[in-house]
Image (tube, rainbow, N blue to C red):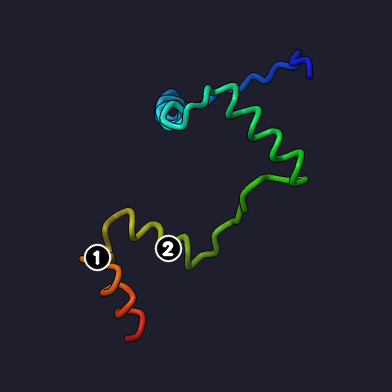
Amino acid sequence: MHKSAIVHARIEPQTKKKAEAVLKKLGLSPAEAIRLFYRQIDLRGGLPFPILIPNETTKKTIRKSRKGEEVETFDSLERLFQSWGK
């Protein structure tokens, strides 16, 4: 297929830098990643991942965790799973 359409987008430089580092590890160029993303949108008839608006409880929890408040850490998956049974 002939590639003649152009997509222009402005993003934050740090986001671009970080994303392109990941793409490099995957062996993808930014253009290949964009083509892949667009193709998946076409094939799925929507975004290839869920986009959800967090509810108030989730927003509050995210804010707290970013501040390091009410965060639990575990030294193994087993201990994490055990904590769920409490």
Q: Position of residue 14 (x, y in %)?
A: 40, 27
Secondary structure at numbered mark 2: helix
Q: Residue at x 51, y 26 (%)?
A: 28
Viewer-proximal residue among 41 and 68: 41
Check disc 2: other Cα within 10 Å, few if <14, some if 14-19, many if 20+. few
In this rendering, position of residue 25 left or right of residue 31: left
Check the image and name the residue furthest to the left.
Answer: 75
Q: Is residue 60 above or below residue 38?
A: below
Instruction: Give the quadrant of the N terminus.
Output: top right
Q: Position of residue 53 (x, y in %)?
A: 59, 56
Disc 2 target residue: 60
Q: Position of residue 5 (x, y in %)?
A: 75, 17
Q: Residue at x 30, y 79 (%)?
A: 83
Q: Residue at x 69, y 33 (%)?
A: 38
Closer to us: mark 2 or mark 1? 1
The image's mark for residue 73 is: 1
Viewer-proximal residue among 67 and 16: 16
Label pair 2/1, CB-CB below 8 angstroms: no
Sequence-wise, the earlier of marks 2 and 1 is 2
Inspect the image, locate mark 1, and give the three-letter code of the amino acid beneath it.
Answer: Thr
Q: Which of the 4 image quarters holds residue 71?
A: bottom left
Viewer-proximal residue among 57 and 9: 9
Inspect the image, locate mark 2, and give the three-letter code of the amino acid beneath it.
Answer: Lys
Q: Which of the 4 image quarters holds residue 37?
A: top right
Q: Is residue 41 above or below residue 3?
A: below
Secondary structure at numbered mark 1: loop
In this rendering, position of residue 16 left or right of residue 2: left
Q: Which of the 4 image quarters holds residue 35?
A: top right
The image's mark for residue 18 is: none
The Cα–Cα distance between marks 2 and 1, rounded to whole angstroms, is 19 Å
Instruction: Give the quadrant of the C terminus.
Output: bottom left
Viewer-proximal residue among 27 and 85: 27
